[in-house]
Amino acid sequence: MSPNFDNLRKAAERGDAAAQFSLGNAYASGTGVAKDQSEAVSWWRKSAEQGDAQAQNSLGNAYYLGEGVAKDQSEAVSWWRKAAKQGNDLAQCYLGYAYYAGEGLAKDLVESVKWFRKSAEQGDAQAQFSLRHPDLEGKSMTSEGCI
């Protein structure tokens, strides 16, 4: 292992949420260490539980795909929601999709549009594309709710 990896691990072990997220990414990609999805999930969880939105999003993806953990769409949605509420555009897009497809929660096109729009406003191209879907046409949110 490289000195940089050793320093990253030490920071992660000290509880640094950003280092924990980065160490999770290293294990997920196999960068500087053998690829290990379970180990990636372990580090992302430590970071996510400290409130790191990127780690929350990654943990949601792991649950959605069943990589390093048992596949669990409800758990994926729970982590995406935490990240989305912090403004993570990817999690907002994934949450919009979950509402659209009814995966891990009840299908709700108004909520789908709400989360796709939040993501799209931050420049997420997939969310911008998704908002043009015919099923979502005419669905919009105001401060008063669906109109």
Image (cartoon, rainbow, N blue to C red):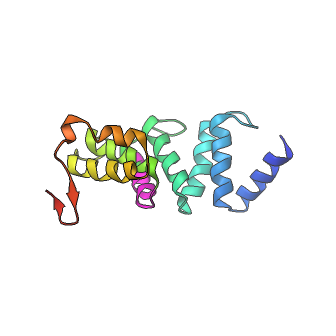
> Would you place residue 99 above or below residue 30 in this image?
below
Residue at image position (40%, 41%) is 72
Is residue 81 inside the magenta stretch? yes
Q: Left or right of 2: which side holds 113?
A: left
Image: 129 above or below 12: above
Q: Nearer the viewer, residue 29 or 66?
A: 29
Q: Position of residue 70 (x, y in %)?
A: 46, 38
- Estimate the x, y position of residue 137 in percent, counting from the top left: 19, 41
Quadrant assignment for the C terminus: bottom left
User: Residue, x 55% and y 59% (percent of image)?
Assistant: 52
> At x 43% / y 44%, what residue is drawn?
124
Residue 99 x %, y %: 28, 45
Q: Is residue 143 above or below residue 40?
A: below
Q: Which sits in the foreground, 92 or 105?
A: 92
Question: Which region is colored magenta?
Answer: 76-87
The count of marks equals 0
